[in-house]
Image (cartoon, helix red, strand yellow):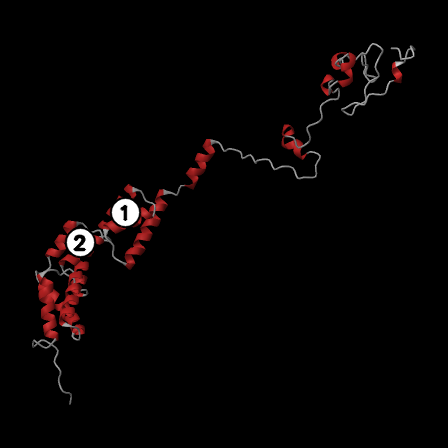
Amino acid sequence: MTDMSGGERDDDRLAPVIPLFGASTAPRSRHGVGVDADADPTAGGDIVPRRTGEAGLWRSTWDERDAEPPADPGARHPAHGAHGRTKGTSEQPATAPRLRALRPAHAADAEDVAEMPDPDELRSAAEESLVRKLRGRAMSVSEARTALRAAGLDGSQVDDVIDDFERRKYLDDRTLAGHLVTSGVERKGQGRVALSRALAQRGIPREIIDEALSELPDDDAERALEYARTKARSMARLDPDAALRRLIGQLSRRGYGGSVAMNAAKTALREAAGGSSRGVRFVESD
């Protein structure tokens, strides 16, 4: 290249080209081909030839590949797993899930069999529990069955115990029904309806209930009147209509309904008011 004075000018005296991407440019040869001063000509295909000519001055960073090996992704990178995340750090290693050894099937079955109670011991304990209950309160067969099932006996064992107790007269629904009827009539003043309901609640069969009630004399009216007399004295100060309604309600709750309760209430209130010779009488004291 010649200058204006006709002399030849050396290309090395040109102003240096400042690279745009921060890397120093290789010195240009006279043929315009950029040569990397650090490049090893024997490196093979690791170096990509740069552009030639003036375009080489504005080469992109894409023109060469980084010859350095890829950086380590780091100790906490997922590729290293749990061991890599804890290795070389002061953190405690992650707790691995505990493995539990599985028991052989025959071993598990043997333990289950060992935990099962002995049938004879279970029955003996259930019988003793039932005897203690019977000492405190008479029970029907239905109530005894419920108690035995709650103690863990199966159906056949329950039937065997019930048969044994009935044979020994520990359980007797007919005797129990007779006691309940007598107690209901004498102590509670109950009529047939209330007695039937009370026996059914104890699980006594229907035929035994009817048999027990059939032994009662057909005197519901008299029993209702006797009960009404015990309550009418405390209602003497009430309004007659209010006293009648209250007394009929009490008779109905004890199994006396309809005309039996109405007649008994009226008779008892009339006697309490002094309308009958059987009412309350006042006598002068000495």
Lower position in the chain sequence, tag 1 or tag 2: 1
- In which quadrant of the rendered view does residue 74 lie? top right
Q: Which residue is mark 1?
A: 161
Q: Secondary structure at mark 2?
A: helix
Q: Quadrant of the N terminus?
A: top right
Q: Quadrant of the C terminus?
A: bottom left
Residue toward you, 76 or 131: 76
**Rendered image: mark on residue 239:** none
> In the visual, does 107 lie left or right of 264?
right
Residue 114 x/y as whole percent: 43, 40
Residue at 27%, 58% in the rendered image: 137
* Amino acid under disc 1: Val
* Amino acid under disc 2: Arg
> In the visual, does 82 lie left or right of 275?
right
Residue toward you, 177 or 129: 177
State how far apart marks 1 and 2 are (Cα): 19 Å
Q: How many marks?
A: 2
Q: Secondary structure at mark 1?
A: helix
Vertical position of residue 207 compared to residue 43: above or below:
below
Q: Which residue is mark 2?
A: 174
Q: Nearer the viewer, mark 1 or mark 2?
A: 2
Residue at 64%, 27% in the rendered image: 79
Residue 261 x/y as whole percent: 11, 63
Residue at 73%, 17% in the rendered image: 63
> In the visual, does 32 lie left or right of 157?
right
